[in-house]
């Protein structure tokens, strides 16, 4: 099966105070929850930097943040049984790539899954997926801004009812 080339990610350029135009990238991702042995567990991924975080990725042209979040979680984790929940807001950070400043904005959504076998997207540098109890997930998360999103998602949870979402 041949793999189609993905559309280019959505990027903008905005001038900064130095006169150079940083690249602005937009992404979306998910805080994925699954009930295991009666308690919520969170899916974390080990990223290309060998740090634990949340699945996320670039928006494709014409794609909404919710569509991108679902697609990216599916691609990075192999989970397809996903239920989209509330919008958890947006985080941002700045980094340098090939000598250029990049301002990244990422919107996250709470999601639920009944699947247990997550498969990391090795081709994108995702080396591991792991379901962790809530307290372990909060402690293991490497990025403070993503940890805040995780905590916001956990505040939305309520006890599961048969056939009803967790929020």
Image (cartoon, rainbow, N blue to C red):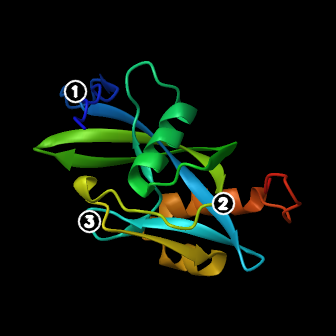
Q: Nearer the viewer, residue 19 or 67?
A: 67
- The residue at which mark 3 appears reads as 49
The answer to whether residue 91 shows anywhere in this view is yes
Q: Position of residue 142 (x, y in %)?
A: 42, 70
- The residue at which mark 1 appears reads as 21
Q: Under tag 2, what secondary structure?
A: loop
Q: Position of residue 131 (x, y in %)?
A: 54, 72
Compared with 64, 163 (above or below) is below
Quarter of the rendering containing residue 100: top left
Residue 114 is marked as: 2
Quarter of the rendering containing residue 157: bottom right
Whether tag 3 and tag 2 are in contact, CB under 8 A, the answer is no
Most extreme residue toward the left, as rendered?
A: 98
Q: Which residue occupies 48% across, 49% down? A: 73
Most extreme residue toward the top, as rendered?
A: 62
Quarter of the rendering containing residue 36: bottom right
Q: Position of residue 72 (x, y in %)?
A: 44, 44
Compared with 39, 66 (above or below) is above
Q: Position of residue 8 (x, y in %)?
A: 27, 26
Q: Under tag 3, what secondary structure?
A: loop
Front of the two marks 3 and 2: 2
Q: Which residue occupies 59% across, 61% down? A: 115
Q: Under tag 1, what secondary structure?
A: loop
């Amino acid at each position: 099966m041949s793999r189609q080339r993905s559309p280019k990610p959505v990027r903008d350029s905005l001038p900064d105070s130095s006169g150079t135009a940083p690249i602005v990238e937009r992404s979306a991702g998910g805080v994925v929850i699954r009930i295991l042995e009666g308690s919520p567990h969170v899916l974390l991924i080990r990223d290309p930097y060998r740090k634990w975080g949340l699945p996320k990725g670039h928006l494709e042209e014409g794609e909404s943040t919710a569509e991108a979040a679902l697609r990216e979680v599916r691609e990075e984790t192999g989970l397809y049984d996903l239920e989209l929940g509330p919008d958890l807001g947006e985080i941002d950070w700045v980094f340098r790539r090939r000598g250029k400043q990049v301002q990244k904005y990422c919107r996250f959504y709470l999601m639920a899954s009944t699947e247990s076998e997550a498969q990391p997207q090795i081709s994108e540098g995702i080396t591991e997926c792991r379901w962790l109890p809530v307290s372990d997930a909060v402690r293991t998360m490497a990025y403070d801004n993503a940890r805040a999103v995780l905590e916001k998602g956990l505040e939305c949870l309520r006890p599961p009812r048969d056939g009803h979402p967790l929020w």
